[in-house]
Image (cartoon, rainbow, N blue to C red):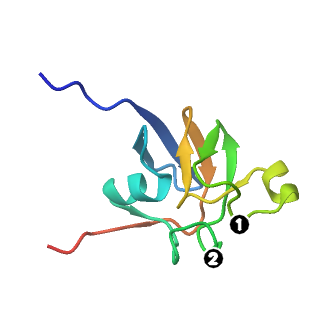
């Protein structure tokens, strides 16, 4: 019997929408799989289109240095396209929208 993939709960503010971020899945992809679109373009951490503020929780990156300055990281900014949840999260993402996948 397959074990479910562990996941962390993610809450978006100010919408209050929530989704699960499976371990090993970038936040942007997890949101999209849950029907939530976050602004994005490059999906590799360089364009900064998806920049959000982490209010609570911890993320990690699998690239050496995402496109954030040290000051931005210290202020809680993250790039969901390359960020992975390490705990339950609350993120400020005012431009989040419902996403309806193409059939």
**Horizontal relation, residue 94 to residue 75: left or right:** left
Instruction: Return the residue found at the far front.
Output: 64
Q: Secondary structure at mark 1?
A: loop
Q: How many marks?
A: 2
Q: On the picture, is 4 further left or further right than 55? A: left
Q: Tell me: residue 60, above or below residue 44.
A: above
Please tell me the numbered disc located at residue 42.
none
Q: Quadrant of the N terminus?
A: top left
Question: Residue 36's spot in the image, x, y percent?
Answer: 40, 61
Q: Residue at x 61, y 55 (%)?
A: 63
In the rendered image, the quadrant that contains the C terminus is bottom left
User: How crowded is the residue under tag 1: few (<14 C-alpha within 10 Å), some, or many (20+)?
Assistant: some
* Residue positioned 56% across, 32% down in the render: 87
Vertical comparison of 44 with 54: above or below: below
Residue 5 percent location from the top left of the image: 31, 32
Query: Which residue is found at the position 41% from the left and 45% from the top?
Result: 19
**Horizontal side of residue 41 vs 90, given as left or right:** left
- The alpha-carbon separation of the residues under discs 1 and 2 comes to 7 Å
Seen in the picture, residue 68 relative to 25 is either above or below; the reply is below
**Above/below status of 52 relative to 95:** above
Earlier along the polypeptide chain: callout 1 or callout 2?
2
- Residue sitting nearer the eye, 5 or 88: 5
Give the residue at mark 1.
Answer: 67
Q: Residue furthest right?
A: 71
Q: Position of residue 73 (x, y in %)?
A: 79, 53
> Which numbered tag is attached to residue 47?
2
Question: Circle 2: is it few (<14), some (14-19), or many (20+) Cα within 10 Å?
Answer: some
Frontmost residue, 13 versus 75: 75
Helix, strand or loop under label 2: loop
Image marks 1 and 2: residues in contact by CB distance under 8 Å: yes
């Amino acid at each position: 019997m397959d074990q479910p993939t562990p996941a962390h709960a993610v809450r978006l503010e100010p919408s209050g929408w929530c989704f699960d971020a499976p371990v090993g899945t970038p936040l942007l992809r997890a949101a999209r799989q849950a029907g939530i679109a976050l602004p994005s373009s490059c999906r590799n951490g360089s364009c900064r289109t998806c920049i959000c503020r982490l209010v609570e929780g911890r993320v990690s990156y699998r690239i050496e240095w995402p496109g954030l300055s040290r000051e931005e990281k210290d202020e809680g900014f993250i790039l969901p396209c390359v960020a992975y949840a390490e705990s339950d999260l609350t993120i400020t993402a005012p431009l989040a929208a419902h996403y309806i996948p193409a059939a």
